């Protein structure tokens, strides 16, 4: 199993930092967006787009590309930041998040946004689509893989478990799901709203290979992805322990920042904190 070098780790961390900067800027300018849950997935998104996935901004629809489905579609600002940084579209588009007539809407739209593999927003549905993609790849004996990012609050949707059962039944070993386990959702703690715990045991009971990882440790996440590639006959889920609002101390672990946009003054302060962080 190939390990990340120190140089690669530094590179991915810098990319994650840039994603957080762009997330804060675009949500602030829009005065609308999901800050906390976008910041919490910046590390896995940076790793996937800048190290792990086979994608080409010059050919967004190439047949042998890896697919990514952001099932927790409200984390779209992070996806947009990654796609823009990768070169799928001009970074200037980020200045028009959620504006009428603009491409980058509040949730991902595969029909209009280069690099988006699936339109998502209604929680649970993206995961089912990812399973369908993985089945298509398996039937075609394709080499590409499918990655799906789920929210832990999203696991309260029944459709998630139908999809999990489906993925096991069809032995979708080319599918890797990541659970953004930050413990918070729009109405509070997941354990207070409708607890999906124990997440690992539930997926294991549905026949999935389960891996635990620190969602902000790119080396650990890389190792998890490499392990998933060796698994045969079953899909893999990586339960990522994350911090909602990661990178901004005042936002970290605060449920009130689920769907709240910073003011311009707050954004200026938050950006300084992100940029000065090691």
Image (tube, helix red, strand yellow):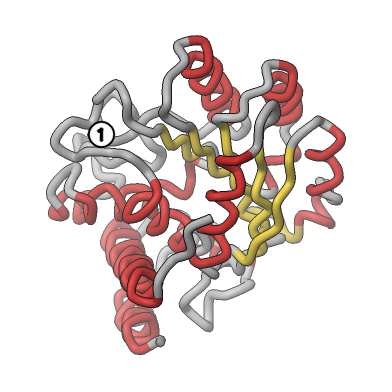
Q: In the rendered image, which residue does mark 1 sit on?
A: 113
Q: Residue at x 58, y 23 (%)?
A: 131
Q: Nearer the viewer, residue 221 or 105?
A: 221
- Which of the 4 quarters of the picture holds residue 164? top right
Residue 36 point in image, percent of width and height: 52, 63
Q: Nearer the viewer, residue 107 or 173?
A: 173
Q: Is residue 57 above or below residue 49?
A: above
Q: Is residue 261 above or below residue 127?
A: below
- Which of the 4 quarters of the picture holds residue 15? bottom left
Q: Residue at x 32, y 83 (%)?
A: 275
Q: Nearer the viewer, residue 160 or 12?
A: 12
Residue 240 point in image, percent of width and height: 64, 58
Residue 221 point in image, percent of width and height: 55, 59
- Total number of numbered discs in the rendering: 1
Name the element at disc 1: loop
Q: Please give left or right for residue 138 compared with residue 87 in the image.
A: right
Q: Please give left or right for residue 253 compared with residue 92 in the image.
A: right
Q: Is residue 91 above or below residue 275?
A: above
Quarter of the image that includes the C terminus: bottom left
Regarding residue 24, the answer to whether it shows in the image is: no
Residue 136 point in image, percent of width and height: 49, 14
Q: Residue at x 46, y 63 (%)?
A: 43
Q: Residue at x 87, y 35 (%)?
A: 205
Q: Nearer the viewer, residue 9 or 29?
A: 9
Regarding residue 109, the answer to whether it shows in the image is: yes
Residue ranking furthest to the top: 139
Q: Residues within 10 Å of mark 1 (few under 14, many from 20)?
A: some
């Amino acid at each position: 199993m190939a390990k990340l070098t120190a140089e690669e780790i530094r590179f991915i961390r810098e990319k994650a930092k840039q994603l957080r900067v762009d997330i804060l800027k675009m949500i602030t300018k829009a005065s609308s967006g999901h800050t906390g849950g976008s910041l919490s997935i910046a590390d896995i998104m940076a790793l996937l787009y800048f190290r792990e996935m086979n994608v080409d901004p010059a050919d967004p629809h190439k047949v042998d590309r890896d697919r990514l489905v952001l099932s927790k579609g409200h984390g779209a600002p992070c996806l947009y930041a990654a796609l823009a940084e990768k070169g799928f579209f001009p970074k200037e588009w980020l200045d028009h998040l959620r504006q009428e007539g603009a491409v980058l809407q509040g949730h991902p739209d595969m029909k209009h946004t280069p690099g988006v593999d699936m339109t998502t927003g209604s929680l649970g549905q993206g995961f089912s689509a990812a399973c369908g993609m993985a089945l298509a790849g398996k039937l075609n004996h394709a080499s590409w893989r499918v990655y799906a990012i789920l929210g832990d609050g999203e696991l309260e949707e029944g459709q998630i478990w139908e999809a999990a059962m489906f993925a096991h039944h069809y032995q979708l070993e080319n599918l890797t799901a990541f659970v953004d386990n930050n413990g918070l959702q729009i109405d509070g703690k997941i354990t207070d709203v409708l607890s999906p715990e124990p997440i690992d045991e539930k997926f294991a009971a549905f026949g999935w290979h389960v891996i635990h990882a620190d969602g902000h440790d790119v080396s650990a996440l890389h190792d998890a992805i490499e392990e998933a590639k060796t698994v045969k006959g079953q899909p893999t889920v990586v339960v990522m322990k994350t911090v909602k609002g990661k990178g901004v101390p005042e936002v970290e672990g605060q449920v009130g920042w689920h769907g709240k946009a910073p003011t311009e003054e707050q954004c200026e302060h938050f950006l300084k904190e992100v940029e000065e962080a090691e």
